[in-house]
Amino acid sequence: MAEDKSISKSVASKKSLTTEQLEESIKTLEKEKLKLERQLIEQDENTGIALDAYIEVMSLVPFKLNLSTEKLGRGRQFSFSRFGEVKRILYNDLASIFENYRSFMEDGYFYILNQKVIRKHGLDDMYEKILTKEMIENILTFNPDNAVKLYTGASDAQREIIDGMLIKKVKDTDDEKKIDFNVISQISKMGGRDIVKIAKEMKDLESIDNNN
């Protein structure tokens, strides 16, 4: 009988231990549930963009572009050194950049490579008027089908950027066969800047500086 009681206590102990394990598992699951709920709260209900999600941003200017999370270059800084360069920026930081560099965004200095972010911030109409990297490259390579048409639809700010890139291309190109002067002429008329003339003047100045 004593042995039976010992066995019973052992079984009871095992049952008790199993119950404790189950209770611990339930507590763990509840903690995980709360953690998940907190993460969901940090996400936008419509787009599901987490504050700590990385968003790709592309520079559309051929010069150094500095963006920051606070005004006057303060806060977290992000620097782009060339046209087409892409950086991954936390959505939380990007939202701050939107506020501080709204004009840069409207002028097409940088481009958001995430449709959810564009939709969330109501930028659809704005982005219909901004030329993408591929569109700008079509102009720079004198695409016969749409180079002039694309330039016509560009904003004044992007036209100025494209003019500068074309001027540099004409200035630095030794083989004139690589330049479509017909496209250049049409773009010059629309933009109000004689691209070939400006390129020649800049090249002459560089030549004078190098000879001095």
Image (tube, rainbow, N blue to C red):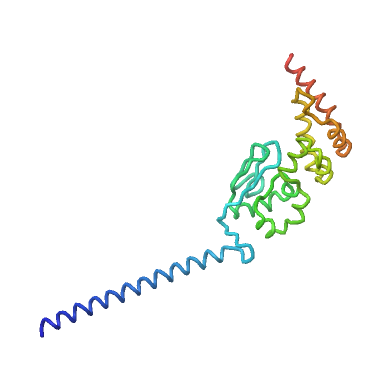
Residue 97 at what x, y percent from top left? 65, 50
**Residue farthest along the front direction in this orientation:** 145
**Residue farthest along the top direction in this orientation:** 212
Residue at (70, 49) in percent of width and height: 101
Residue 51 at what x, y percent from top left? 57, 58
Residue at (50, 66) in percent of width and height: 36
Q: Is residue 24 left or right of residue 107?
A: left
**Residue farthest along the left direction in this orientation:** 2
- Can you say whether 141 is above or below 103 in the image? above
Q: Is residue 189 left or right of residue 130?
A: right
**Residue farthest along the bottom direction in this orientation:** 1
- Can you say whether 176 is above or below 138 in the image? above
Residue 184 at what x, y percent from top left? 84, 33
Residue 206 at what x, y percent from top left? 75, 21
Residue at (65, 50) in percent of width and height: 113
Q: Is residue 132 left or right of residue 96?
A: right
* Quadrant of the rendering where the N terminus is positioned: bottom left
Residue at (39, 69) in percent of width and height: 28
Counting labels gives: 0
* Quadrant of the rendering where the C terminus is positioned: top right
Q: Quadrant of residue 165?
A: top right
Q: Is residue 44 left or right of residue 201?
A: left
Choose between 206 and 66: the one closer to the eye.
206
Q: Quadrant of residue 120?
A: bottom right
